[in-house]
Amino acid sequence: MKKVLLKQVASAVALLVLALSAWALTDKQRDEVSSRIAPAGKVCLQGDSGCGAAMAASGGGAKSGKEVYEGSCQGCHATGAGNAPKMGDTAAWAPRIAQGNDTLYTHAIEGLNNVGMMPAKGLCMTCSDDEIKAAVDYMVENSQ
Ligand code: HEC
């Protein structure tokens, strides 16, 4: 009985030593670790030169039409789900494009329910009108 207990204590101590040895890092390793666990989203203030490039690459500017399409539109417009005109389907898009860009923009921003359910802004409520317009342009460019 006692022997079993001793064995358990011994293995607990061994585990502890193992865990502690993980802290015995060289400075270089520590630097590597801290750069790996650095927060991914740094707060960038306007005029802050330290993270200007990261800001331009994400979040800072408007999303491109392609980005909005991939994030919010392709769920329906890549597959044709619910009668959505498929991107690249020139026949499906021709009569829609013929309405003119302004009508397409309005329908994309406000929604349209003729033959299917086109939700307002494709449900991207954080997208600006300009970002939705860019996504429409992107789909139209690739569908004529
Ligand atoms: C839930 C599915 C769904 C999503 C998501 C969606 N659409 Fe649509 N979309 C549709 C359907 C269905 C139609 C056809 C509606 C109709 O004619 O009744 C349509 C039609 C359109 C049209 C043509 C409008 C016209 O006047 O003929 C545009 C432009 C459009 N969508 C843009 C977008 C954009 C931009 C996004 C992403 C921001 C998007 N859609 C996301 C389903 C969707």
Image: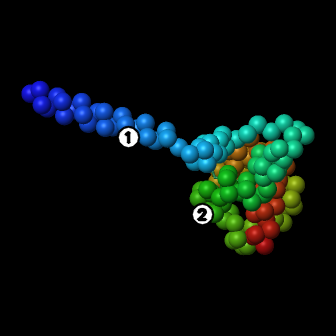
Q: Which mark is residue 68?
A: none
Earlier in the chain: of badge 2 and badge 1, it is 1
x and y, in percent, of residue 102 in the image? 88, 55
x 90%, y 40%: residue: 47
x and y, in percent, of residue 8 in the image? 21, 32
In the rendered image, which quarter contains the N terminus? top left
Q: Nearer the viewer, residue 141 or 100?
A: 141
Q: Is 16 situated left or right of 137 in this image?
A: left
Q: Is mark 1 within 8 Å of ligand 1?
A: no
The CA span between labels 2 and 1 is: 53 Å
x and y, in percent, of residue 67 in the image? 73, 56
Asked if residue 109 shows in the view, the reply is no
Q: Are marks 2 and 1 in contact (CB under 8 Å)?
A: no
131 in relation to 74, above or below:
above
Q: Which mark is residue 79?
A: 2
x 18%, y 30%: residue: 6
**Three-letter amino acid code at disc 1?**
Leu
x 56%, y 45%: residue: 26
Q: Secondary structure at mark 1?
A: helix
* Image quarter of residue 135: bottom right
Q: Secondary structure at mark 2?
A: loop
Q: Which mark is residue 18?
A: 1
